[in-house]
Amino acid sequence: MKPITVSCINDGKIRVTSISWERIFLDLTIESSYDEALDFSIAKLVFPKDDSDDDSQENGTVLKGRLLGEIPLDPVYADGSVYTFRINITAANDRSFLDNARWRFMTRLKKDSNIHICTISYEAAHQLPELSRVFSYGRSKYAYNVWFTTFCGDSVNIVPILNSRFMIENPDWRDRYSVSERRTVKGKLNCLVKKSKLSLMQLTYDYCDKVNRKNGRSILFMSETKPYIWGNLKYIDDRLRERGLDKEFDISYTFRQAVGKHNSAGGWMRMIRMLAGKDFIFVDDLVPIFNTLRLSKKTKLIQVWHAGEGFKAVGYSRFGMKSSPHPEENCHKKYDYVITGSERLVDVYSEAFGLPRKYILPLGMARLDGFLDSDTIKAKQDAFYASHPECKGKKLILFAPTFRGTGQKHAHYDYDMLDMKRIYEFCADEYIWMIKMHPFTRNKPEIPEEYRNRILCLDKNDDLNDLYYVSDILITDYSSAYYEFALMDKPILFYTYDRDVYEIVRGVHKSILKTAPGKVCDTFDELIQALENKDYDFEKTKKFKDENFGAYDGNAADRIIDTVILGK
């Protein structure tokens, strides 16, 4: 917006009464002394005599200033004169971060044209020094800093100021006049080559997209993590065909395992030509090409995510931690819509993908359609027992933990935390213990030959979701596997031998001990005892099911098609 001169009032009648952080969410409450409903914003304001951010000229309760920018704030709750806000700091400015500036909370009244600046209660102001945050990224070479300062022009009313700054490492920090990082010639050349390649890719896409004119009828299903269609993508595709919409829409596919692997120039160009001209692109996981490729504004990129809800922090839930995503050039920022299983998960997905709530559509998980259908259950069971006849007539325990390590290249699991002998003895002639590892996990469990009739290691051909239909008990940890399994009214145990370390180092978006829908076991002894005593804390599972699947109707694929593709 163009700078405009405004009259500002900070008379203490609109105040911030509480302010706190929850990971990347900034929570605040504002109370008003006015009767009318108010709309709030965060604003970049500067005051004469210059356009610096020096508040030395700000004086008294009424003052002239220049409004350089304004971003609306949507309350998550409003009750009369009390407004509660949850600001996703990774998406405070629509999809983007707040720029380098000093920001004030403000509103306008119907009766005048003044800007009313929010002050802050003394109790809340005392907390401001503790609310500074440093979010490092880019291998800790860069950081996004958020901190609070205050101003008081009339010796009574305190104005809170939110400061945001992107910072760069300065090797010469001992020199007080050194303000920027020195860069090597090699570094500059590498940067130039990289930008040239990205520019060529973008030009190729723009040209191909222009040649392949859109008609609103072109759909692409894609994955860069699996070489086949599955899960939510498959159920949406199947439902399109069941409704005969494949005759109205041109549907194409690209599935491959490319994440973390080198891709040739020819491979990139083929992918770009595939993307060009598409009206709808559905993905279910990370797709790195969207980190930098700008799609046509007429193309809708839809993330249907392969998981439901887990504990581990992913995407922007990890902002400021190791392997933190880039503030802007990240594929998660590019989604037009993200589909989630329920309204309860909107904040979870907003945090993970660094997007405002309005882009998160709680339409349901398509792959849960028919999840409780008796014919589907029987078909899945028959298919499993045909492949694993040794399991027939046994109770099946599904052990499905997530990997350890920072990513795909270093994914592993510590099998020393499993006592194979005790598992074998517990199973006896009643149970079979099925091990289904995360596909990223590189190391495999070593199961002694004499235990293999009771301990079974499944491979990639056994789909995790299909295993839910035959499993009697699920044992997992920080994975999202429990989400769908809870719908089947079966026990869930959580084996979290490294819970404290995982929560602190890897990061979670909620406490496992407090929120897990089942019994949490921190030692192998506790896990075996829970199994022996059938101590599952099953009431937690039932409560979780009621909260998350109370409105389950098995029609998510139809809602996604009608809302996103048909625009109904």
Image (tube, rainbow, N blue to C red):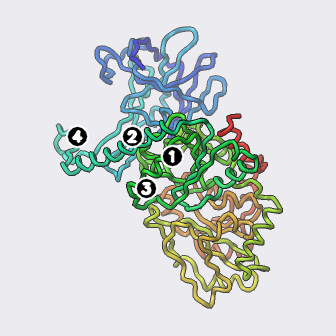
Residue located beneath label 4 in the image: 180
Whether label 4 touches label 3, CB < 8 Å: no
Q: Which residue is drawn at 49% across and 12% down?
A: 114
In the rendered structure, find residue 267 and report the number of the disc placed on it.
3
Provide the secondary structure element on which disc 2 rests: helix
Mark 1 and mark 4: Cα distance apart in space: 39 Å
Q: Quadrant of the C terminus?
A: top right
Q: Which amino acid does label 2 sit on?
A: Leu
Task: Sort mark 1 into few (<14), some (14-19) or many (20+) by Cα contacts within 10 Å.
Answer: many
Q: Quadrant of residue 377?
A: bottom right
Task: Sort mark 3 into few (<14), some (14-19) or many (20+) by Cα contacts within 10 Å.
Answer: few
- In the displayed structure, 486 sits above or below 524; it is above
Residue located beneath label 1 in the image: 275
Q: What residue type is labelled 3?
A: Gly
Q: What residue type is labelled 1?
A: Leu
Q: Which amino acid does label 4 sit on?
A: Ser
Q: Nearer the viewer, residue 237 or 63?
A: 237
How many numbered tags mark residues here? 4
Task: Sort mark 4 into few (<14), some (14-19) or many (20+) by Cα contacts within 10 Å.
Answer: few
Mark 1 and mark 3: Cα distance apart in space: 12 Å
Provide the secondary structure element on which disc 1 rests: helix
First along the sequence among labels 1 and 2: 2
Q: In which quarter of the image is the N terminus?
A: top left
Residue located beneath label 2 in the image: 203
Provide the secondary structure element on which disc 3 rests: helix
- In the displayed structure, 38 sits above or below 450; it is above
Q: Can residue 300 be seen in this view?
A: yes
